Image: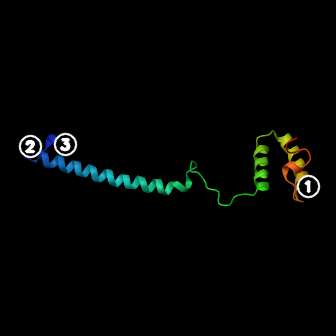
Amino acid sequence: MCADDVPAEERDSFQAFAELLSSLLHHEFRARLEALKERYHPFDPETDMRTIIEPDPAERWAAEALDLLATLPPTLAQAIEVASALIMNVRRVGDTPASVPGFGCC
């Protein structure tokens, strides 16, 4: 495009200059893009989060119960909250979910 405006004897050197300039700009903006990606990484909602402290079975069970509560209609969720408060009183003595009457298998 601009090479047509350059005299014929300088056209090859101008094209070489344009290619070098294009390569330089490409690498400069590529470095900016990588820096932006690096700065965005902590805010990326798609990034996998690592578990730093592994929860014990009781904490895991409680978290799963809360996740289930979040999917239930409000009135049923309130009834389950009351029931879970009663269960937590039983669990304080060290019972597991399977040993609480009405929970667990068979």
Residues under labels 3 and 1: Cα distance? 83 Å
Q: Amino acid at mark 3?
A: Cys
Q: Position of residue 2 (x, y in %)?
A: 19, 42
Question: Measured from the top left, where is residue 80 in percent x and y?
Answer: 86, 45
Pointer 2 local density, CA inside 10 Å: few below 14, some 14–19, many at least 20 = few
Residue 96, image x, y percentages: 85, 53
On screen, 91 above or below 11?
below
- The answer to which of 103 and 11 lies nearer the viewer is 103
What residue is pinned by disc 1?
90
Name the residue at 14% across, 42% down: 5
Nearest to viewer (mark 2 / mark 3): 2
| Residue pointed to by mark 3 | 2
In the picture, measured across the screen, residue 9 lies left or right of residue 104, that is left
Comparing 51 with 43, the one in front is 51
Q: Position of residue 48 (x, y in %)?
A: 58, 51
SS for dot 3: helix
Amino acid type assigned to the residue bearing label 2 in the image: Ala
Q: Secondary structure at mark 2?
A: helix
Mark 2 to mark 3: distance in Å?
12 Å
Give the side of residue 99 with respect to residue 68, left or right.
Answer: right
Q: Which of the marked residues, 2 or 3, is nearer the chain's N terminus? A: 3
Is tag 2's residue or tag 1's residue first in the polypeptide sequence?
Answer: 2
